Amino acid sequence: MGVDLPLGVDLEIRRPLTHIEGLAERCFAPQERERWYALPPTRRLAAFFDVWTRKEAFMKAVGRGLGLGLTRCVLAADENPRWETIPDSCGRPDEWLLRDLDLAENVSATLCARAPNIHWQLRDIEQALK
């Protein structure tokens, strides 16, 4: 839950995709594709879903969906996820927090919020409701 700030979360179970290269071609910016193809084939599936959930969480946070353009939102080549480029209508890249969530093996999940310095915590909903 978020209070008074744009917030998006996405999670995906990493599963084999028959046309993963085609999806990367359509959904990744050129520099993202280049980095993705440079990975060993055994790491590409997890990397694909990591990039996908980061972009999806951002689309949800800005409330524009896929129409915003996945290739217009470019992730930096850093160890820690952050935006290199986003559409001008979404503000500056440094205004956004991106955090990968460690939920389970074979799951990619990301939280995105327009508040780079917020305090956040991941809680088990069952425990929170007790």
Image: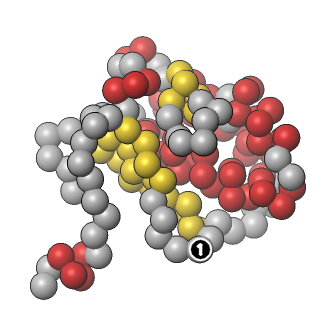
What amino acid type should be assigned to the residue bearing mark 1? Glu
Where's the N terminus, which quadrant?
bottom left
Residue 27 can be seen in this image: yes
Say which of 127 and 53 sits in front.
Answer: 127
Q: Residue at x 74, y 26 (%)?
A: 30
- Residue under the image location 43 percent in, 24 percent down: 93
Taking the spot 14% from the left edge, 47% from the top edge, the residue there is 3
Determine whether 14 is above or below 26 in the image. Answer: below
Residue 97, image x, y percentages: 38, 38
Quarter holding the C terminus is bottom left
Residue at mark 1: 105
Would you say 64 lies left or right of 68 here? left
Q: Position of residue 73 (x, y in %)?
A: 54, 28
**Residue 61 drawn above or below residue 69:** below
Farthest top residue in view? 88
Q: Is residue 57 left or right of residue 69?
A: left
- Total count of labels: 1
Above or below 65: residue 111: below
Local secondary structure at mark 1: loop
Placement of 23 over or under 82, stated as above or below: below
